[in-house]
Image (cartoon, helix red, strand yellow):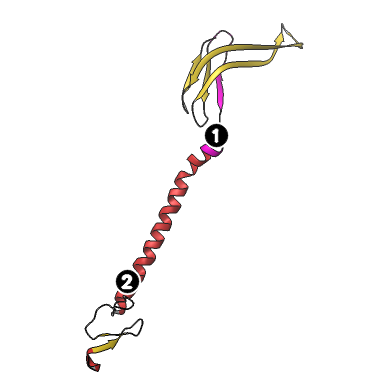
Amino acid sequence: MTEKSEKPCIACGADIPHQAILCNQCSSYQSAWKNQLRYIANVIGVFSVAAGAIIFILSALPQVRQVVAWRDQVQVLTFASNKPIAMANTGDGGVFVTDIHISGVKPSGSDFSQIERFGNWWNQDKSLPLIGQKAHLPI
C-alpha cells in the first residue's frame, strides 16, 4: 500500500487504512469522542453493577439477621386468673407454646406485710401465629 492510503491509529499507533473506523490491533475507534463515549459507558456500567450489588446486600440484611440471630419473643397482653391469657408473638417467626408458667406475688388479705408467692402451670399445646397477631389461650 502507498503512504497516503495508511494512517497511524490514534490509540496504539499501528498502521491502519486511511478510511478505517476501527483499529484492527486495539479495537479503538478513530474518532476521539467515540472512544470517550465507550469509556464513559463502561464506567457507568461498573457503577450500576456495584450499586445493584450494594442495594441487594442491604435488602437482604433483615433475612440474614433472622438466620444469624433468630429472636423469639412472646408477650403476655392480658392475664386474669379466671379468663383466657392473651399473648402476642413479636419475634421473627412462629412460636409453639407448650407450657405457660406465671408466678409473682400477691397480698394475703388486707395486710400487705405478709406477701404470699403464687405460681401456676398451664399445659396448653397452642401455636402462636406469626408476627403481630394475637392468640387467646383458655385456662
Q: Is residue 135 above or below residue 36?
A: above
| Residue type, numbered disc 2 | Leu
The structure residue drawn at horizontal position 43% and vertical position 49%, both measured from the top left corner, is: 56
* Stretch of the chain drawn in magenta: 67-83
Mark 1 touching mark 2, by CB under 8 A? no
The structure residue drawn at horizontal position 57% and vertical position 15%, both measured from the top left corner, is: 79
Q: How far is the residue under mark 1 from the one under mark 2? A: 49 Å
Residues 109 and 80: in front is 80
Instruction: Residue 90 in the image: state x and y as whole percent.
Output: 52, 29
Indicate the secondary structure of the residue bearing disc 2. helix
For marks 1 and 2, the one nearer the N-term is: 2
Please give the residue where the numbered disc 2 appears in the rendered image: 37
The quarter of the displayed image where residue 44 is located: bottom left
Instruction: Residue 5 in the image: state x and y as whole percent.
Output: 22, 89
Q: Is residue 84 above or below residue 19?
A: above
Instruction: Residue 104 in the image: state x and y as whole percent.
Output: 68, 16
Residues 95 and 113: in front is 95
Residues 38 and 88: in front is 38
Numbered mark located on residue 127 in the image: none
Badge 1: few (under 14), some or many (20 or more) residues near its Cα, within 10 Å?
A: few
Q: Is residue 62 above or below residue 121?
A: below
* Location of the N terminus (image quadrant): bottom left
Please give the residue where the numbered disc 1 appears in the rendered image: 70
